[in-house]
Amino acid sequence: MKVYHGSYTAISLIDLSKCEKHKDFGQGFYVTRFRKQAEAWAERIGRKNNTQGVVTEFEFFESAFTSWNYKVLRFEVYSEAWLEFVVANRNPKNDSPTHDYDIIEGPIADDKIQRRLDTFLKGKISKKAFLDELRHHEETHQICFCTPRALMMLENESGTSSDHLCSIEDMGERIIETLMLDYDIDDDKAADVFFSSQTFTQVSNEMTDVFKKPWQEIYEMLKKELGK
């Protein structure tokens, strides 16, 4: 899936520690499948920082949504569950993360919704009235990558990201690192699992062109081989 991030500058490396807290889904790196939404945000934040504003395009590997490796939360539409989750994350009194999800997808609380949300929190409108308003709001979309391991499923389309792996050696290092995290094994065991696999045999055979695939796809091949 093509996804987009609007900012005052192009994004090459992602540092979650620099991402703002108290956003809709907590601290994390946010993207959207709607380019126009990212363009609007880039224009807005660009004006704020006296720059043109830039939209960075990424490829998101949607297998993360169904993978046993990732803890995922998805809100299909505005709902009471979405509202409660956003309120908890936006509460400035919550200094610690309110959840332990890797990836979260759902609608966005844009400026208009934020203003009405403030009104709701002040008790000036009921929850039912607020939710009724949300049902008529135009469709929005965002995905939040909350953990470093979640970012492994996001690849910068410009090819400048550190996650854009161009050699079998680099690919192997990333896959071994991920095996260590997902299977709770040391580096020697992870290396043995990868290098003794049929997946590695295919990767190392230039006749197959498998090595040209993104490392995330090759890792999915390896998981299938391992029965996970």
Image (tube, helix red, strand yellow):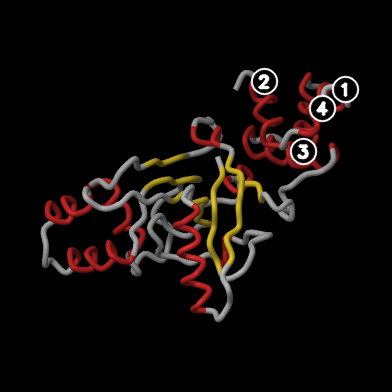
Query: From the viewer's perspective, is the residue at label 3 or at label 2 nearer?
Result: 2
User: Which residue is nearer to you in this view: 150 or 215?
Assistant: 215
Callout 2 secondary element: helix
Query: How far apart in space, not on screen, are marks 3 and 2 (Cα)?
Result: 17 Å
Name which of mark 3 and mark 1 comes first in the sequence: 3
Query: How far apart in space, not on screen, are marks 4 and 3 (Cα)?
Result: 27 Å
Q: Is residue 136 left or right of residue 46?
A: left
Residues under numbered marks 4 and 3 in contact, where contact means CB atoms less than 8 Å apart: no
Q: Is residue 42 above or below residue 215?
A: below
Query: From the viewer's perspective, is the residue at label 4 or at label 3 nearer?
Result: 4
Query: How far apart in space, not on screen, are marks 1 and 4 (Cα)?
Result: 6 Å
Q: Split into 4 quadrants, where in the image is the C terminus? A: top right
Name which of mark 3 and mark 2 comes first in the sequence: 3
Residue 222 at x, y percent in the picture: 70, 25
Residue labelled with disc 2: 226
User: Which amino acid lies under the numbered mark 4 shown in the image of this protein?
Assistant: Asp
Q: Is residue 102 above or below residue 207?
A: below
User: Which amino acid lies under the numbered mark 2 shown in the image of this protein?
Assistant: Leu
Q: Residue at x 55, y 66 (%)?
A: 7
The 10 Å Cα crowd at callout 1, few under 14, some 14 to 19, many 20 or more, is few
User: Which amino acid lies under the numbered mark 3 shown in the image of this protein?
Assistant: Asp
Residue labelled with disc 1: 207
The tally of labels here is: 4
Residues under numbered marks 3 and 1 in contact, where contact means CB atoms less than 8 Å apart: no
Residue labelled with disc 4: 209
Residues under numbered marks 3 and 2 in contact, where contact means CB atoms less than 8 Å apart: no
User: Which amino acid lies under the numbered mark 1 shown in the image of this protein?
Assistant: Met
Residue labelled with disc 3: 187
The 10 Å Cα crowd at callout 4, few under 14, some 14 to 19, many 20 or more, is few
Q: Is residue 26 left or right of residue 189?
A: left
Residue 44 at x, y percent in the picture: 46, 71
